[in-house]
Amino acid sequence: MKKGKSPQKLLSRQELLEATGLSSKALKQYEEAGYVAAAEVKDGVKYYTEETSELIQAMTRCLGRCANLQEAHHIALQGLAQKERRGREAESAQLQFIDPTKVKLHTRFEGLLRIDEDLAENLSADMAVGGYFHSQPIVLATWPGQEEPVLIDGHTRLRAATKAGVPKIPYVVEKFRDIDGALEYVAKVQTQRRPTDDWVRYQLICEIDSLMDRGGDRRSEQAKSKSSQEPIETKYANSAERTAALTGTSPATVKRARRINRDGWPSLLEAMQNREMTITQAEKAIAEKAKTGPITEEELQVEENKKPMVQLTDANFEVLEQLDETVHYHVNKAVRMYIRGLQKMGRLPKE
């Protein structure tokens, strides 16, 4: 007898409702929108696959951070695809071990997300006592032109292990088609780890946009051969779709984040950072503010006066130097952000 894939278990409509916790009215809405369909109808009874049940549950989890059902469906599909991929990776992964002080870093991935210092400190304390959990390997990567494996995921764990004096930590090596493939992997992993954190999602979108401006990776060989105004060919129809695919969100969320980045003001961003406001809520606040006119320089000055002055003490310099970049690099990045803010206010011409 020829071996093949086991037939899927089918769920009746009632079984599907019980498994997903969905109401009959909501299921009808899903079906009418084309997001859910019965696998077969027998004796007047609809039957659904287990994959359909899983999709519905994923969409339900996504609805809390999405503006509508379409966005929830888009994100749920991406999340399930990532889950399947990670499952395959877990089955095939063969761990190796490395001295954490020997791990090679790459600037493109060091700055993708800021390290949570409190988390790193707590992890370091745990590792100093209990060692490193082998179920959480760091991820190194190679791609054409980058033959030596470099760290793309696990910077917080690496810092914690180094501080704790852990002699060896587990790692896996992934091979990618190019650096953008590695970037896509990391962005999706980060969003899957923080599925409800809009502030992290916003940071990722802004970081991806800044690294891959005007439709592609401007640091690649392809980019260097084109003028600054020429688009870089990608597999996506536009930059919003590209960034959405990289960050595990939807094009609509990317556009909202871009508007926040362009028109937002300090207290709005602070509310997002404190998890008091979502991307959708922040974008709506900007839209409401636009009805009464742009934010004035007087209002911006009030916002600025609320901020404490930054004092670059010896301790500050020491911390900056420990971030594996020169102090000049961090100051230069801060100046670029300040210039971008002045451009938003119209006090400097846009480049």
Image: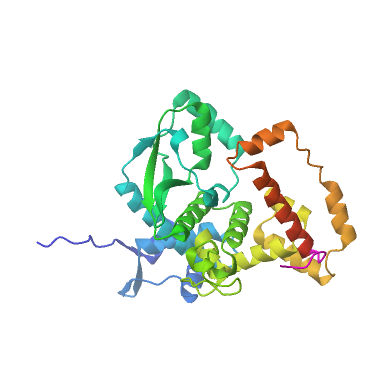
Name the one closer to the observer, 224 or 330: 224
Q: Give the residue at x 71% y 64%.
A: 262
Q: Give the residue at x 50% y 38%.
A: 157
Question: Compared with residue 70, is residue 4 higher up or lower down, i.e. above or below?
Answer: above
Res 336 → quadrant = bottom right
Name the one closer to the observer, 24 or 142: 142
Residue 54 in percent (x, y) is at 41, 59
Is residue 349 located in the magenta-colored stretch of the structure?
A: yes
Is residue 283 located in the magenta-colored stretch of the structure?
A: no
- Quadrant of the image containing the N terminus: bottom left
Name the one closer to the observer, 216 or 281: 216
Q: Give the residue at x 67% y 42%.
A: 327
- Quadrant of the image containing the C terminus: bottom right
Most common SS among magenta residues: loop
Furthest residue toward left: 1
The magenta segment: 345-351
